[in-house]
């Protein structure tokens, strides 16, 4: 029955009720008590009037129920409107009680019917959702083409193309692992086009073009295939584990905060305007190390969840949110890690693709939803055992072993900070009270370009000073791959304002500092690749020669003041891993000419220090430094990497 028909029926019933009411009220039965009949009819008339008003106000959804209610009232009123001869006055009241009972009964019946209808609809919807949760047995044509392209693309994105990635497994000292050993296993991406443009995404475009061509060829050769459920399952496994291992490697540098080190004394005394945007962002994270830890825990949680199929969607959501923010931050602050962080966002989107309609259905439409479950059944026992063994091995290696070696590095060989202790009594911030060059006193002037204006000795083997002259900017992020302290450059990365940073090797017997400038001009890509290959050869050679100390160069007696063995001895034995040993030897052999100084130092208690000797231009310098116990608004870090 249509809504119009329902309304017309209700209006007809209302008219009949009104006519009956008038008839009943005008001609009471013979012998009836006038008062009893009047009372009964008064109650009946009120009920009818009320129902008529309700009927007029009812919506189209409950009009049928109201009409049925009127019919019941009319039948009851007809029975009680003309009582038999000799009826008592209470007959009218009993009739209306019957009316109320009839109305209540009909309302309950209508509600029960509505509940049954809703339950049937819900059961039908739930059954439909369960049916939708099964992988389709027949894919649409565009789905098969898209999958073929995606399969080729993501497999190419997850396979290391560099042969050195495979050979490094045989070069590790597995009894003395360094954090960078497993980190380099976890951290790879397509990098076969150096400086290819397109903001670093050139490799992606090339691989995508290859995937399109391969996908079309695959389509032409496999037209009869109806679905790729099994291949899709294995592709998601590959992507899940690649993303999980990579993000865990990223995460541990924040869980034990070394990726963004707390600012050194020299950086704390550098003007805000002399820092690059990237440096400012990194410092804003480094000064609140517990936030860095929180960010690491978020990334680590995403990685752990991705190891398991049932939690992979949640892990992908967290990964997308965390790394999506990092992508934008790197574009906004010119951080240089936008491509690698985009790598994980891409994987997260792929893993979420099949669940996005389900997520929309659940959270936006608020409907009963069951996710699509792509799984395979492994029947052979040896395959099930192999599967569990491989999965357990990956989790143990990249969670527990990884955490242990990162903890060791946090304590004894910080990721980006120099590891060797500096001269303890010299540590601090100094003002230059007297400065001479070639025996000529240079009075203090903030505009003077020769005079040193302030000096800092760090906890490690670094001396910094400030001059009123521009310095070239190191636009790197102070990466943590170098094994020698001189090549760890987070102190100069993104720092301008005339701040000079020198690494020193100390002759503590004769009180002599051999200082070398940490800044080196960046090499072009061709030279960098060439030197990288040379470094690999030297690394292999050093492994074969058991890391014999390198001889000093005759042309540059300051090239390496300390022998390799002496440089090893500066480090805590717990941090002297196999990679560090090989790396120091290789980097020493690669060392090139730098700006250098030789200064004699003298101090009784460190409050006053006298430096004298030759500067980088071979001029004679003499200066008196006074330590300032400077107070900073920033609180000291409660999570300090390294043992100094």
Image (spheres, helix red, strand yellow):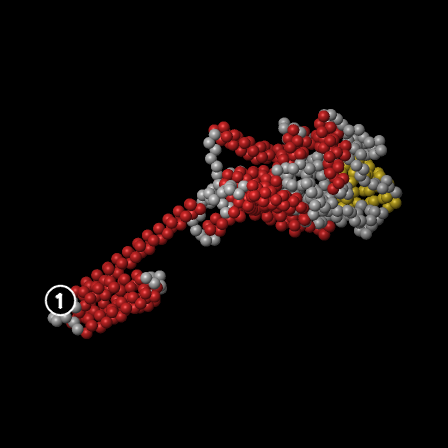
When the figure is inspected, residue 326 is found, relative to residue 79, above or below; the finding is above
Regarding residue 192, the answer to whether it shows in the image is: yes
Residue displayed at 86% across by 41% down: 619
Figure disc tally: 1
Q: In the rendered image, which quarter is residue 71 located in?
A: bottom left
**Where is residue 404 drawn, in percent x and y?**
60, 33
Q: Tell me the quadrant of the picture where the N terminus can be found.
A: bottom left
**Of the pair 380 and 281, the residue shown nearer to us:** 380
Left or right, 38 with respect to 235, comes to: left
**Residue of label 1:** 84
**Of the pair 39 and 466, the residue shown nearer to us:** 39
Q: In the rendered image, which quarter is residue 148 located in?
A: top right
Regarding residue 339, the answer to whether it shows in the image is: no
Q: Secondary structure at mark 1?
A: loop
Residue displayed at 78% across by 40% down: 517
When the figure is inspected, residue 179 is found, relative to residue 446, above or below; the finding is above
**Where is residue 460 drawn, in percent x and y?**
71, 37
Q: Tell me the quadrant of the picture where the C terminus can be found.
A: top right
Left or right, 67 with respect to 412, comes to: left
**Where is residue 438 drawn, in percent x and y?**
88, 42
Left or right, 582 with respect to 367, comes to: right
Residue displayed at 73% across by 31% down: 537
């Amino acid at each position: 029955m249509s809504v119009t028909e329902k309304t017309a029926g209700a209006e007809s019933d209302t008219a009949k009720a009104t006519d009956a009411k008038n008839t009943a009220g005008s001609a009471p039965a013979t012998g009836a008590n006038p008062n009893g009949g009047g009372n009964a009819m008064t109650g009946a008339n009120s009920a009818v009037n009320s129902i008529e008003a309700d009927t007029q106000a009812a919506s189209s959804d409950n009009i049928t129920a109201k009409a049925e209610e009127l019919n019941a009232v009319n039948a009851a009123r007809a029975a009680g409107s003309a009582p038999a001869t000799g009826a008592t006055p209470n007959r009218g009241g009993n009739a209306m009680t019957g009316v109320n009972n009839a109305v209540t009964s009909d309302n309950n019946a209508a509600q029960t019917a509505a509940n049954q209808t809703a339950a049937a609809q819900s059961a039908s919807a739930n059954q439909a959702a369960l049916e939708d949760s099964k992988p389709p047995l027949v894919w649409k044509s565009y789905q098969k083409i898209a999958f073929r392209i995606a399969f080729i693309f993501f497999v190419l994105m997850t396979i290391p193309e560099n042969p050195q990635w495979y050979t490094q497994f045989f070069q590790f000292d597995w009894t003395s692992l360094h954090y960078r050993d497993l980190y380099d296993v976890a951290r790879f991406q397509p990098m076969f086009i150096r400086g290819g443009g397109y903001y670093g995404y050139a490799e992606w475009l090339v691989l995508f073009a290859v995937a399109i061509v391969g996908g079309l060829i695959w389509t032409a050769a496999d037209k009869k295939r109806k679905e790729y459920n099994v291949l899709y399952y294995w592709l998601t496994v590959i992507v899940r584990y690649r993303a999980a291992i990579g993000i865990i490697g990223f995460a541990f540098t924040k869980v034990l905060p070394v990726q963004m080190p707390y600012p050194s004394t020299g950086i704390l005394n550098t003007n805000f305007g002399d820092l690059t945007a990237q440096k400012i962002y990194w410092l804003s994270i480094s000064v609140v190390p517990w936030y860095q830890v929180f960010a690491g825990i978020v990334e680590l949680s995403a990685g752990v969840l991705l190891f398991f199929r049932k939690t992979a969607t949640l892990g992908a959501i967290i990964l997308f949110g965390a790394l999506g923010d990092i992508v934008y931050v790197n574009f906004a602050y010119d951080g240089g890690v936008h491509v690698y962080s985009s790598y994980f966002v891409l994987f997260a989107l792929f893993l979420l693709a099949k669940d996005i309609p389900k997520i929309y259905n659940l959270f936006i439409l608020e409907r009963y939803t069951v996710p699509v479950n792509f799984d395979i059944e492994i029947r052979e026992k040896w395959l099930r055992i192999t599967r569990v063994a491989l999965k357990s091995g990956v989790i143990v290696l990249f969670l527990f072993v990884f955490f242990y070696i990162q903890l060791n590095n946090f304590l004894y060989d910080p990721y980006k900070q120099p590891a060797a202790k500096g001269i303890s009594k010299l540590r601090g911030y100094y003002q230059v009270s007297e400065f001479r060059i070639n025996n000529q006193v240079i009075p203090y002037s903030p505009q003077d370009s020769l005079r040193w204006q302030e000096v800092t000795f760090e906890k490690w083997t670094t001396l910094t000073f400030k001059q009123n002259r521009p310095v070239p900017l190191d636009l790197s992020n102070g990466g943590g791959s170098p094994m020698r302290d001189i090549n760890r450059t987070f102190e100069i990365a993104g720092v301008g304002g005339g701040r000079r940073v020198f690494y020193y090797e100390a002759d503590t017997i004769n009180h002599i500092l051999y200082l070398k400038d940490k800044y080196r001009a960046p090499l072009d890509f061709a030279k960098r690749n060439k030197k990288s290959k040379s470094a690999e050869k030297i690394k292999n050679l050093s492994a074969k020669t058991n890391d014999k100390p390198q001889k000093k160069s005759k042309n540059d007696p300051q090239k390496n003041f300390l022998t390799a063995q002496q440089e090893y001895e500066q480090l805590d034995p717990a941090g002297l891993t196999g990679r560090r040993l090989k790396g120091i030897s290789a980097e020493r052999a690669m060392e090139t000419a730098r700006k250098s100084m030789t200064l004699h130092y003298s101090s009784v208690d460190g409050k006053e220090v006298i430096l004298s000797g030759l500067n980088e231009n071979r001029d004679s310098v003499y200066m008196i430094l006074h330590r300032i116990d400077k107070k900073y608004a920033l609180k000291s870090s409660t999570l300090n990497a390294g043992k100094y």
